[in-house]
Image (cartoon, helix red, strand yellow):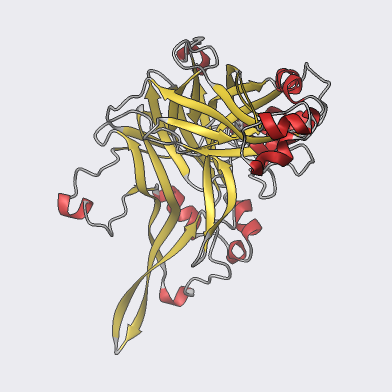
Amino acid sequence: MIKIVRGVMCAALFVLATACTNNSDDLGVQIQPQEDQIVVAADTFHVSTKDFFVDAISAQVDTLLLGNFYSSKYGSTQGELLVQFAPPLDYVFPSAEYNPEPDSLVLLMYYRNWFGSSTSPLQISIYEINKEPLIYTEKYMSNVDVAQFSDLSILMGQSVMTSIDKNLSDSIVEDEDYIPAMRYKLSKEQLDRFFNFPASAYESLDAFNDLFKGMYITSTYGSATMLHLLQIDMKLYYHYTYEKMGKDTVVNASIVYPANQEVRQLNKFVHNNLEEVMISRDSVNYMTATAGAYPKVTLPIGRMRERIGNEIGGRMLNFNRAVLTVEATELDSSDLALPIPPNVMLVRESDLEYYLQYNEIPSSADSTAIVAYYSSTNQSYTFDLAYMLTKMVRSDMSNYNEEMEMVMVPVDIFSISSTSSSTISSVRPRARLAGVTVRSGKNSYSPMRLEVVYSGF
């Protein structure tokens, strides 16, 4: 440990006048009593880490994931959907004199982005929610039990697709305005059912959802594609006829039932045999999204108090710098490698459950969360813990046994931008695939560590 003390003490003023050679500008420091001098020191503290497995995050996410992707290192993640649809309120079909007739009922799932293979088949199966309805005000988690909502007895549709439609030309697929979509035509039975809903179904969201509670959408084949859905619509096409200048004129019309923010959409994530695939090793820890594995870090607050207290005595402690370095390792550059989480948040374990459910840190006096960004140059994350540690270590300098357990969570950061600056509006658990292996606290090459510079005054 390095200890830096400014100035040289002289025994008496007359000795100072003849024997001290320091610049006269330092006189005020030199004649201070020893206990009044500022102590500045640097130290390194190793931290304890372990793999920490998390089943679920909030099921209310901004990007809906649908599909299945398997990684030999991080296991499989399956994205499934539970969605409601909103009717066009107060919609009125043409009266019987215009002879309205149904044409088709189509489910459209739009996705601008996807992850995985462009050629591997993905089978999508669509079931009707026929048990309990989704409750708009309920806070669901991503491990929600589908059996609560559907008994899978009503298969509304099934389709095999690839993330890039091979029936389209390259010029269409590469056009910047092109938005890929899975398009599935539902049965005539379903078409007639929707077309014959009573007018009262369009009076309110509740009235419509009483007649149709929604869909459970899952992948039943394929393990190399995950779609990032932008929007889900159900569209009813019909036509009617009216007479114009003595001739019948056919008018084609449609109704859109969007799965929008007025109704509920849930993203369910399934991780199969995660702890068996991620082989526990002392040298590394795993970090994945969505949910899965989050490294847990134990900070030695008591040990820091003891060592630092021995250096600064009764002086007031302040951390000038405190950086936790988390280094990525075993990086994979293959085409199907999971992306490294760009943002990670360190949150107290005691606050983790609340954060994952509500997407916010509880507003209590000891709640703390720190965000770090991945540096591709240094292949690491660096957390600035100076403010937090100053508060924590100061709180009880005589307690040498205290530890603080924190968990690293991959996150998405949402900002509000203005002409001059941007402000973080929310930090939510990452809802897209990601994975990275980091060096643990026991790594023999470069262990996870906390490097501090502190002062006592």
Q: Is residue 188 above or below residue 383?
A: below
The quarter of the rendered structure image containing the C terminus is: top right
Residue 329 lies in quadrant: top left
Residue 39: tell me if it is visible. Answer: no
Residue lying farthest to the bottom in this orientation: 245
Residue 36 lies in quadrant: top right
**Residue appearing at x 49%, y 36% in the figure:** 80
Residue 251 lies in quadrant: bottom left
Is residue 195 shown left or right of residue 240? Answer: right
Q: Is residue 370 above or below residue 88?
A: above
Q: Is residue 67 above or below residue 202?
A: above
Can you give x and y, in whole percent of width and height, for residue 96 in the image? Answer: 47, 73
Residue 134: tell me if it is visible. Answer: yes
Can you give x and y, in whole percent of width and height, for residue 279 in the image? Answer: 47, 11
Front one among 398 and 252: 398
**Residue appearing at x 57%, y 43% in the figure:** 428
Can you give x and y, in whole percent of width and height, for residue 126 in the image? Answer: 45, 39
Q: Is residue 237 above or below residue 22?
A: below
Can you give x and y, in whole percent of width and height, for residue 141 in the image? Answer: 62, 36
Front one among 291 and 410: 410
The quarter of the rendered structure image containing the N terminus is: top right
Is residue 234 shown left or right of residue 332? Answer: right
Front one among 141 and 193: 141
Label count reads: 0
Is residue 345 shown left or right of residue 123? Answer: right
